[in-house]
Every structure is written in C-alpha cells, then in structure tokens.
Amino acid sequence: MSDVAKAPVPFPDDAAPFPDDAVPFPDDAFAFPDDVIAVDPRHVTAQRCVMAMIVIPLGIGLCASCLAIPFAMDSAVWGWIILAAIVMLTVIVAALLIGVFPRADYRRYRYRLNDQGFEIRSGIFWRNIILVPHERVQHADVTQGPLQRHFGLSNLTIHTAGTHNATVVLEGLSEQVAQQLRDQLVGKRGR
Amino acid sequence: MSGDVRRLHPSSILFGLLRTIKQFLFALLVTIFLASSGNQWALLGTAIALGFSGIKSVFDYITVRYQIRDGDLIVDEGLIFKRHRTVPVERIQNIDHLQNPIHRFFDVAEVRVETASGKDPEAVLRVLSMTDLQRLQENIFSQQSVCGDEKIVAVADEGIVGPKPVDPVQSPTTQEGSTEGNPAEGKPIQAQPAQAQPTQVYEIPLSMLLKYGAVSFRGLTLIPVVFGFYWQWQWSGPESYRRFRGNLPDVSWLQTSWFVYIAAALCFVLFVVLGSAGWFAIRFYGYRMTRSGDDIRVSCGLLTRVSATIPRDKIQLVSVQSNLVARWLGLATIRIETAGGAGTENNKQAEGVLARMWFVPVCRQSDVDRLLHEIRSDLSAGEDLPWQATSPRTRRRLLRLYVALAVLIGLIYGYLGGVGGYFATPVFIGMGVWTAIRYSRSLRYARGPDRVAYRSGLWIRRASMLFYDRVQSVVVTQGILDRRWNMARVKVDSAGSGPAKHRIEVAYLDADFAAHEAAAICASATGMLTGDLKQSSEIKRRDDAGAAPKMLPRPVARP
C-alpha cells in the first residue's frame, strides 16, 4: 500500500475524508433563496393551453379507440364498464396535466441574476439548478411563439460555448422583462 | 510568395479517385458481385460512375487554387458552384497534416487548415507536396509574425530555451488574458517567427509503447466475436457449410478434450495481447511532442504519419487515465479536449483523435506532472488539491443498487440455467458488494483555487481537471432517487467534450454540498468568489456540524 501512496500521481489515496462528526442535512437543499424571481403568472395559462392542445386530442383518440372494447368482448356490460373506467381515468389524468401540473411547475420555476451569474431553478420531481457565469454568455435571444405572443410572453435563450448545455432557456417571461434581462446579461458580460 | 497562386499536387487526381472508391466500397462490392452473376449493366454502371469520379477528380485538381494575399489565405474551388474562401492568416490556429503510405510514396500530404470556429476545418487541401506544405507553413507563420505586434518578442525569446526538458518555471504563463472574454471564442494565437526553434518535450520509446499496448487490452472487444464463432460452431450451419465440413478431417474427438479449450484460451489471450501491442505500436510509433511558443505539436505513426498542432489556449479539459495493470507498471495516458471542431466524437478525423484522445498515449506516471506543466504552467496532476469523498451514504446506496442488480441477474441466470444457476447468485452478490465498496471509494471530487477536478473508476481510473476560466455552465440535478438519499449531481460543462471520455460530472454528493459547490464554481468562473462561498466546503461542514448532529455512518477511509 505504501508505494501506492508514494506514486506521484493523479490518484492520491489520501483524499481528505469528511469530518467524522457531522453531516447535517437541511430539509431541502433545493429550497429557494430569498432573491429568486418567478416568471410571469400568465405563463401558467400559456402552459395550460399547450398541455390542452397535446392532451385533449390524445385523450379523445385513446377513448375513441377503446370504443371497440364493448363490441369485442363477450359480455357487453363488462365491456361498457371497462370503457367507462378508461374514460374516467383519462379525464382524471388530463385534468391533472392541464389543471395541476402547470401551476406546480410554475411554483418550482425561478430565476435570478446576481454578481456571479444567471441562475435558473426548475423541476417538480427532477430538480435542476442551472448556473451560467456572466462572462460565458455568448449571446442571448428573445423568442416568441404565436401562443406566447397572444399572452404577451417571451422566452429568453442564453447561448454558451459549452457542449452539453450550450443553450439555456428561460420560458414565460413578460416581453419587457425578457428584453431587460437580455440587455443586462449581454451588458454584464463585457465587464 | 504573396500573390503567388498555387495548385494542388498532380497526384491529387489519384487520391481523389481513391477516396471515392473508399467511400463507395460497399456499393462497388455489390456491383462486382452482381456483375459476376451475369449482370453486365451493373458493370457498365460502375464504370460510368468511376469515370465520372475520375473526371471530378481532374476538375478538382484544375479548379482548386490557394494563395496568400494581403494577410489572408484565399482558397478558390468549384467549377459550377464556385467557392471563394478567405481566412485571415492571424486567425489560423493549426496546420495539421496526415500522410499514409501512399501519400509518402508520392511525397505529399493531406493538409487541414483550422481556425477556432466551427466543427469543420476551415480549408482541407488534398493533397499538397511536402515542399508546398512547408512553404505554406513558413508563409503563414511569417505573415503572422508581421501581423502580430510586440507579443512576438516575448515568444521569440522562448524559442531559445534549450532542448529537453523544459523547465516549467521558465515557460511563460500565457494564460493571464484568458479570463477576460470567452476562452472558447479563441483568440488569435501569438504567432511565432518561422525560425523559432521548437523544443523537444517528450518522446516515447518503442518498448514502452509495446508494454502499454499489451496491457491496454484493446483486443478484449474481440470476445463477443469469439463467442459468436463458438456458437456458430455448435450450430450445424446451412447445407453448403455442412458439405464443406464433410471434406475436413474428423476432429470431433478434439472437442471433448479439455486440453483443447485451455490451449485455445491461451492462444486467444496471446492473440489479444500481441494484437493490442501491435496496434498501439503501429499507431504511435515514433511519437514526438514538441513545443514552439504557445503551440504544442504532436506527431506519430508508422504507416499513416499524423502531425497536429494544438494551441495551448484552446485546451479545455485535461484528463489523466490508466487501467489497473498500467498502474502497476507505473504508466498513464493523458487526454485533452479542445474547443472547436477537431477531435469531437462525431468528427473522428485521424489527427483530431490522435491529438486529443491520445494526446500523450503513454507516459511514466513520474512524467505526468512535467507534461501537464507544458499544457499550463500552473497545472499539476492534482496532489495539491483538497480531494474529498462523495457523500457518506454513497456506499450504502451503491450497495443496495448493485445487490439488487446481482439478485436480479442471479434469478435470471437460475431461471435459464436450471437449479445450478441459482447457486451462482451468491457469487453475483459478492461481486456486487465488492464493486459497490471499491467504486464508492474511488470517487473523489476537488475544488481547488484555480480548477475543479473529479476522479472516478475502478478498473480504469480517470482524473479530469477543468480550469475555472474554461467553465461554461454548472448544473445541479436531483432525481427522484437522489431526493430519497438527499443527494444531488453536479455537472460542469466546458466547450470541448468528447475525446477524453470523462467529464466533470460528480454524482452522489450531499444535496446541500452540491448546491454550495455549484454556486462556488460558478462564482469562481466569474472571478467573483467572495464571502460565504469562499470558505472551503469542508469548513462549512464543520460549522454546520454543531447545529444539527443528524449523523449517518460514513465509509471507512482507505487503508
């Protein structure tokens, strides 16, 4: 073992372990600091519209294709019961996705811009914190889809020279805020 | 030769044709097969296609011209769709070239001119004669020294540094400027005059190449192939095969002898070892690393000779790697990642792969530090870093995962292999436990004053280092399982990712620690590391300790 320790190289085995006495765990390391900002509340409505546009056709399609069940089964009564169950389940899932999810997502979606850089926190089940140092902002775009235009919202897209997170998107900002943020980001970069 | 318009070497017609043939080799084989079974049209089609390709090669030769005029490299090509490309000479980062045996026969080389931008080389000249290449290089370097200003003086001094080894203290730090502006944007390199004498940095003796090649076990990928053959052998095969086999002497008695199996296994191992050693030796024969000014130049190869220039300020990530046997022998590989296109995973051009993935294919571990100094004068292998283990619960989490996996595999094995298979389950569980314990111990993370580092791996150990001025973004993620264990994962993104096959992505960190470290890395990247973030995480942990003694056992420190 001793010669391993002597090896002058990249794999030192004497890594400092954590102190024995303590590893405290706060209840939630992903809790929001005080200075984070939520995006525009209209984002929830916009997200609901997007969700509805995806979920409703899919749900109708699913239910329609299940219409065959009562006719295919020997006992039509059970067939209708199964169909009813499927329809109800679909409605519940759709209601969750359209009614609850966008709101919950919005609650967990914050950003802030401070001296260190730009930070986005997001995610209900899988949580993310994305940090972009100021000087690494290559350029920033403000984009707007038709639905977002209707609600007066914009996305801010930040480009870095990175490979795995080369673009970082912050959705659902009001137009003015998005423009301001972009100007701030690009302005701060130069310092 | 400013204003002197030059052409490719005439043999480029031949190489153009060869390239087409290589690209359409499969189609060509198919047509030959068709032709052999009596389809004359296929033959005619092939002939016409080849004819067209030949004509295209001739036109390529006629139309491609390059010149250096007013500080720009100008490349014209195309007959119908003309392309006129102007590359400012001071933006040129590399002039790489490649020579396979046929190239060498004609004394020509394939040349790539690279700038920092984009995924593709700015200009590819297939092929130039060696004298033309030399003239082009000299021209570009002399032009750069005209365009450049007082910077050159500093670099020119350095050219005088004697032959090897370079004293790391003397090698000037050229990185001061790199925190301002984005490093990946790539600044024009500080040009050196053509007469600057390159300094010899490293050479690899053949014996070391053979030794490392033998233990690199590249041939292990052949194992599935061998198994495939084995099963094929068991299977009686189609009619024609059985007829063929009937003509062979009867060797069925051999199959029952255990001796044959051992002999075959030994032969296979020998084959793998010799094959790996041979591949390594041929690929990296005559490896030489030199440095002139701010450029590191690497060349090697027995058959295909490759030569590449890497500007030091393009280097993003540095990774030192070695497998178990190589560690016993005291050898290691150094890999790097650069900004810009060359050497990314999708772009496996020979020189790109060579120069990044195999930056130093093998070196003694005692030389690692010296070589890292060449990359950046303040870079060392990392014994100065405050290495830390991951979360104390890592081992328990990995144990659960691996034991569950082992049980699953054991059950499947038992289901497929009968009752005897179930007895293998304890073995699998033992392996799982061993792997979990060793792997959790191998994980180390460090946030140094100037760089962030991560090392991992059981069999192949990889230690990667990323300087703060190369950090592009930092991400902390916490999946559902992570949340159960109160852990999180920190990913640090840089401009070059791929060839090193390792990145700064540290899993199994305590969630609060991960969030804190991410903020600190980001702050360091901005150069704004202050206040609360500045104190090392370890100290922070001690402070917190008194408040909440919510303790969990931590893994035993290594003996």
Image: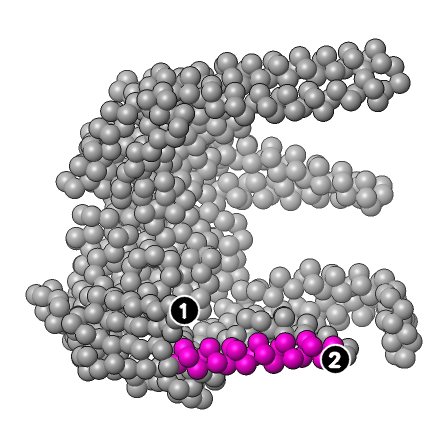
Residue at the image point whose x is 20% and y is 40% from the top: A189
Could you say which is closer to the camera, residue B399 or residue A55? A55
Residue at the image point whose x is 38% and y is 68% from the top: B81
Helix, strand or loop under label 2? helix
Q: Dot 1 corresponds to which residue? A: B351
Residue at the image point whose x is 27% and y is 61% from the top: B312
Instruction: Say if A12 sits above or below B15 in the image.
Output: above
Q: Dot 2 corresponds to which residue? A: B36
Residue A114: x and y in percent read: 22, 29
Residue A189, label in figure: none
B48 within the magenta span: yes
Q: What's the amino acid at mark 1?
A: Glu
Could you say which is closer to the camera, residue B488 or residue B238? B238
Residue B204: x and y in percent read: 40, 74
Q: Residue furthest front?
A: B80
Residue at the image point whose x is 52% and y is 78% from the top: B52
Residue A8: x and y in percent read: 36, 57
The mark nearer the N terminus, 2 or 1, is: 2
Q: Main secondary structure of the magenta part?
A: helix
B495 within the magenta span: no
**Chain ID, mark 1:** B
Query: Can residue B157 be seen at all in this image of the molecule?
Result: no
